[in-house]
């Protein structure tokens, strides 16, 4: 019985060892996201016509949504489209924010 207790103590000691923390490195942005993309005419009504990176298109789209209060009040994940956004969303009245990025990518080239 004494051997079992000694064996348990050894296991506990092995688990209790501290892990060595990795040195933090600054994350590099993906160059594909920073490339300026051509914007379709439908999307240009919302974010402007000059070429922008995907990240900036998303930022401007959210600015437009917040400015015009198009985010659903009950379910914040949904966006209620106005006439300009309906053209971007393929005629859909309501779109989830996850589906929105997929639909917007069709308007970028």
Image: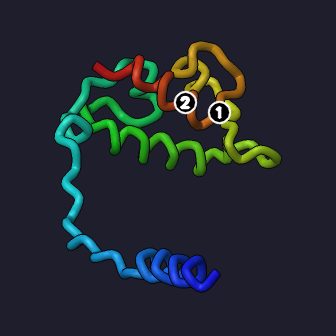
Residue 31 located left or right of residue 60: left
Please determine whether, in this image, residue 7 is positioned above or below residue 76.
Answer: below
Q: Distance of mark 1 from mark 2, alpha carbons?
A: 6 Å
Secondary structure at numbered mark 1? strand
Per the image, the residue denoted by label 1 is 96
What's the colour scheme?
rainbow
Q: Identify the residue shown where x is 74% and y is 43%.
A: 72
The mark found on residue 100 in the picture is 2
Secondary structure at numbered mark 2? helix
Residue 92 located left or right of residue 14: right
Query: Can you give x and y, in whole percent of width and height, for residue 14 in the image?
Result: 41, 77
Query: Can you give x and y, in whole percent of width and height, for residue 31 in the image?
Result: 17, 40
Badge 1 vs badge 2, beta-carbon distance below 8 Å: yes
The mark found on residue 76 in the picture is none
Residue 14 located left or right of residue 7: left
Q: Where is the C terminus found, in terms of image quarters?
A: top left
């Amino acid at each position: 019985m004494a051997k079992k207790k000694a064996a348990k103590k050894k296991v506990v000691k092995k688990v209790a060892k501290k892990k060595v923390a990795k040195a933090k490195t600054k994350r590099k942005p993906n160059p594909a996201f920073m490339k300026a993309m051509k914007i379709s005419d439908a999307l240009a009504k919302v974010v402007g016509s000059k070429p922008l990176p995907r990240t900036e298109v998303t930022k401007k789209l959210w600015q437009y949504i917040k400015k015009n209060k198009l985010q659903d009040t009950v379910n914040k994940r949904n966006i209620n489209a106005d006439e300009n956004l309906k053209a971007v969303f393929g005629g859909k009245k309501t779109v989830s924010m996850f589906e929105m990025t997929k639909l917007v990518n069709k308007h970028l080239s």
